[in-house]
Amino acid sequence: MSIQAKPLHSVGVPMKRKEDPRFIQGKGHYVDDLSFPGMLYLSLVRSTYPHAEIKNIDISEAMKVPGVKAVITGKDLEAAGLGWLPTFHGFDKQMVLAIGKVLFQYQEVAAVFAETRAAAIDGAEAVQVDYAPLPVVADPFTSKTDKVLLRPDREAKTNHIFHWEVGDKEGTARAMASSPKRIKQRLWFQRCHPAPLEPCGCVAYFDAMGRLQFHVTSQAPHVYRTALSLVTGIPEDKIHVMSPDLGGGFGNKVPVYPGYVCAIVGALKIGRPVKWIETRTENLTSTGFARDYHMDVEIGATADGQVTALHVATTADHGAFDAAADPSKYPAGIFGIVTGSYTFPVAHAEVDAYFTNKAPGGIAYRCSFRVTEASYAIERGMDILADELGMDAVELRKKNFIRKDQFPYPSALGFTYDSGDYHKTLDVALEKIGYTALLKEQAEKRARGELMGIGFSTFTEVVGAGPSKHFDILGIKMFDSAEIRIHPTGSGIVRAGTKSQGQGHETTWAQIVAEELGLDPQNIMVEEGDTDTAPYGLGTYASRSTPVAGAAITMAARRIREKARKIAAHLLEVGEGDVEWTDYKFQVKGVPSKTVTMKQVAFAAYTDMAQNEPGLEATYYYDPPNMTYPNGAYVAVVDVDRDTGETKVRRFLAVDDCGIVINPMIVEGQIHGGLTEGFAMAFIQEIQYDAEGNNLNTNFTDYLVPTTLETPHWETANTVTASPHHPMGAKGVGESPNVGSPAAFVNAVIDALSPLGVRHIDMPLTRDKVWRAIRDAEAKKA
Amino acid sequence: MNLQNSGEEKIPVGPDTVWTFVTDPEKVGRCFPEVVDVTVQDATHFEAVVKVGVGPVRGKFNMRVELLPAASKRHIDMKMSGGGFGSTVDLTAGADLVDAGDGTTLLKWSGQAEARGPIAAVGGRVLDSQAQKLIGQAFGNVRQQLTA
């Protein structure tokens, strides 16, 4: 046997991504790369009005445009029973094409099918829609008054969608009232948009067997298949959903959009393939946005800084339809994580959601169901409390952290935190950033009137949805799955119910299988996104892939190992009980010289299996016993120009604890990406609507994505506390940097401005906002 | 986004001449800045195709226009709505014709417009100044045609 040059272990190795050669050569395979004979193009007519009655839709001119084959409207769909689409949250529905009225600007009004993309756009332009404008409700506080009822189609004649609450209301009020120190602050996490570089799109056609072949930008292909079957009545076996390479998702590609339904209806009606690809503007103005939470945060504490109570009351803007794709039992997602990393003895959180004349959505953007909003609320709140107490923000955090000996920790709002060592993670951050020296520098600068800030965020996330007892989407429990086949020559394929959008599953999943079976990860192929071949899974979002599907893959591999053990026993000519798996091979107990490798066993499984079942494959559906709780300590150091309001992030350090790390390079890449998005939300990104309901950020000149020029240099480090219930001890990491970083940026800027008496500025902290805050504060002082 | 404007223009002809002009759909239509085509429906209705360019938003707008002359022959309102490439503009304007007594007319006008879609989003920062420019051009055209 040749000497093994490579290390046998795969987990923890910064293996280069297997998918990257095709991506960096421009050989990725995206939906828009597909072309089929006779394929038509779909373009959608969209409303220019945020709220208006539709008097008439005249398609006659559109039908005269050369190349236009058909135009369908909401009335056509309604007649076919397809006028409305259930939202993934399950308690609302949304119009596929506007019926009777439009509820937000850029809402889908008519669908035009044509021979070319240009003809479809020309046709859409020629559709004449007569609108009678209605009063516009552009914010949830106006919506609350119910002066204008936005959704008369609903049974409840109110704009109020739901009230949700968790925790001890009376107990919290009592504890708050008797707390010597209290802070209260309204924090608005602004509406933003994940803006994946590839917008949404699909190609739909019915094949010769009458089967729907549906290629689509989906983070959750199986859920799409089930949802499409439920909506259209097409039997689920007659629907084949394929999600090819995705150019980013960030939750934007979880919901089913009207364009998809129109493409399918067009393909059925005309009998030809139909392609629909969004424009950038369509993506930014009509698909799943993020946040838009107005949070009133109240914290009680003792005079020496021991937290006593937390109350958060949120007013949420859900837009025209309740399409926030939250699990059924969690209309406000997992917002209950708002107690963060701290030992609040009692807490109460409530959310009231309202309809407005704005695009629907709410939970996208690299966020595990409202965890980003919750983390921002508590991490800003703790800084405001520190300011009120005149206490160092680090000292306050350390005083209130859940200690490592308190895990598993039952939080006041009902979660059982699995593991963590918050003090250690923060200490690593303080050491690496050189906190003592920074404080000295800051004191010197303040004496000179210069504005320098140091901001912390010591967040705890909750990811890996989720245990079937609590979590489902449209009734489907949020398990995930894996199927592994090992070929005779010791290579193999793993299929999972997840769908990578850039996370690197082709590498990470191969590393898990390789680690568990002692095989070469280069020869483990990973396939996802095809509902005909992949086992049923709920998809990739909310940092759930490694916590749920990663666990399923581990367990499936272990099933293979148990099967292989029987064959190994036969090869080693001993009883099964005498075989042990050690150092990535099977060995006769106590006889290190008598071994067989998995590669040898794999060959035997097809050639010399004796009385054992031939072949070597296994499937596992994993229902997680608990969520996982990644956490981190982030530090931002900023300088603010007193005259211009210009903010410079001089340093940013992220120390993450995401449990056992499978591929450190991929994890670091995820953290870089998430920090860049967190930076964008903190400083530049907002989907703004004016009072008349106009969306003011409809493209990349008005909605900015940071380039390498603006993006700070990221410093990273990590600590490891394994998840006690995940079979590999992993926790998930994709969203941590996006969840944790916004508060660190804002805390740093506010810390810089605190000598002027500035206590809070809502994101994004643009130059003009910061400049105005400085100017107002100086005017107040003078 | 909402735009509001008002002003006064001195027209070097008498109010009766101005009245005949502003109640003629063809003539009014031809005064629109960057007008490409005018189709008259009847005495008070016409359609105009105009070229629009605000920042990166460029294309043609199809506008439907209704003239609402008052019986006094000294006041006229105009309603205009339309758009193109996913944008719309709704505009209402009114003008009083005041006899200056010296053979000229003082046109006292006011208008408000609601712009929606990309033109409001992209053009938001420059739309106000752009509107001023277009109004100036329109009245320039009126003066030019009346004195030609």
Image (spheres, coloured by chain):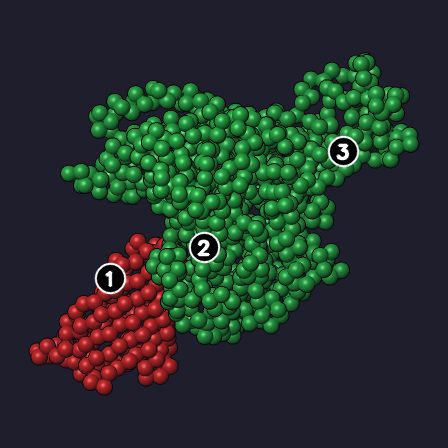
Chain colours: A green, B red
On whether disc 1 and disc 3 are found on a single subunit, the reply is no
Residue A559: mark: 3
Please name the residue shown 27% across and 67% down the image: B112
Assess whether mark 1 and mark 2 are in contact (beta carbons under 8 angstroms). no
Q: Where in the figure is residue A129, as x and y percent of width and height?
A: 46, 71
Q: Nearer the viewer, residue A390 or A412?
A: A412
* Residue positioned most to the bottom: B71
For badge 2, the amino acid type reads Ala
Q: In what element is the residue under mark 3? A: helix
Q: In what element is the residue under mark 2? A: strand
Mark 2: give few (<14), some (14-19) or many (20+) Cα within 10 Å. Answer: many
Gap between marks 1 and 3 measured at Cα: 75 Å
For badge 3, the amino acid type reads Arg
* Residue positioned most to the left: B102
Tell me the subunit letter for badge 3.
Answer: A
Q: Pointer 2: what residue?
A: A353
Mark 3: give few (<14), some (14-19) or many (20+) Cα within 10 Å. Answer: some
Tell me the subunit letter for badge 1.
Answer: B
